[in-house]
Image (cartoon, rainbow, N blue to C red):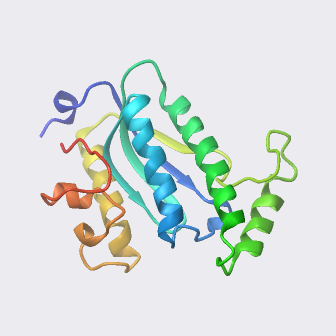
Amino acid sequence: MNIQHRINGKVYFVTTTVVDWIDLFTRPVYKHIVLESLAYCIQTKGMEVYAWVLMTNHLHLLIGVTGENTVSDIVRDFKKYTSKKLIDTLQREVTESRREWMLDRFEFSGRNDKKIKNYRFWQEGTDIQEVFLNDYFEQKMEYIHNNPVKAEIVNHSHEYRYSSAIDYAGGKGLLPVVVV
């Protein structure tokens, strides 16, 4: 399979991580905020998703960008929106047993950054790697899909709900994915 003939535009492997590797994405309420924001980026910002996985404390994407937005623009807007929405939700979740501890960590992380008003949710910077080669694309896709298996969350990658592995196994996942 020649990836370049199947995909329009440039392709990127993107990783973003929660501050201090805090495991916030263990509850569906937080996971769905990320999913809704990714769906918005797909619908309105020209992002095409080829593979993705949301782990307990980080997100991997293999994406293409079409239209006027750059990958940096999309990731910046995604992180800004989800950061605010996740912090707001965390503040309201009175049943969250680790709420005060997490908010303290997020506040501490943002305290010395003039760009941050109150809290830093995502670690500063995002790992964005442009994908040029088919082999590299396939390597990153396998890495993404095997993350939950390696973490011993599931035995088979297609069993993990918050991933595109199901799409590649012939099923329908939670986000629209361009299967290549």
Instruction: From this view, report whether residue 18 is shown above or below residue 126.
Output: below
Q: Where residue 87 appears, x then y in whole percent?
A: 68, 57
Is residue 31 at least partly visible in the picture? Answer: yes
User: Residue 14 in the image: x percent, y percent?
Assistant: 46, 45
Count of all numbered marks drawn on residues in the image: 0
Residue closer to the observer: 122 or 161:
161
Residue at 19% from the left image edge and 45% from the top image edge: 179
Does 71 sit above or below residue 107?
Answer: above
Q: Residue at x 25, y 72 (%)?
A: 159
Q: Based on the displayed image, in which of its 4 quarters is residue 77 positioned?
A: top right
Is 177 positioned to the left or the right of 119 in the image? Answer: left
Q: Quadrant of residue 18?
A: bottom right
Residue 15: image location, x then y, percent = 49, 50
Q: Residue furthest top?
A: 68
Question: Residue 93 appears in which quarter of the rendering?
Answer: bottom right
Quarter in which the C terminus is drawn = top left
Please tell me whether residue 173 is drawn above or below residue 23 in the rendered image.
above
Q: Quadrant of the N terminus?
A: top left
> In the image, what residue occupies the spot 29% across and 56% down?
164
Q: Is residue 137 left or right of residue 100?
A: left
Q: Is residue 146 above or below residue 121?
A: below
Q: Does any portion of residue 130 appear in the rendered image? A: no
Instruction: Tell me which residue sits at (62%, 56%) in the image.
Output: 86
Closer to the camera, 11 or 31?
31
Q: Position of residue 65 (x, y in %)?
A: 38, 29
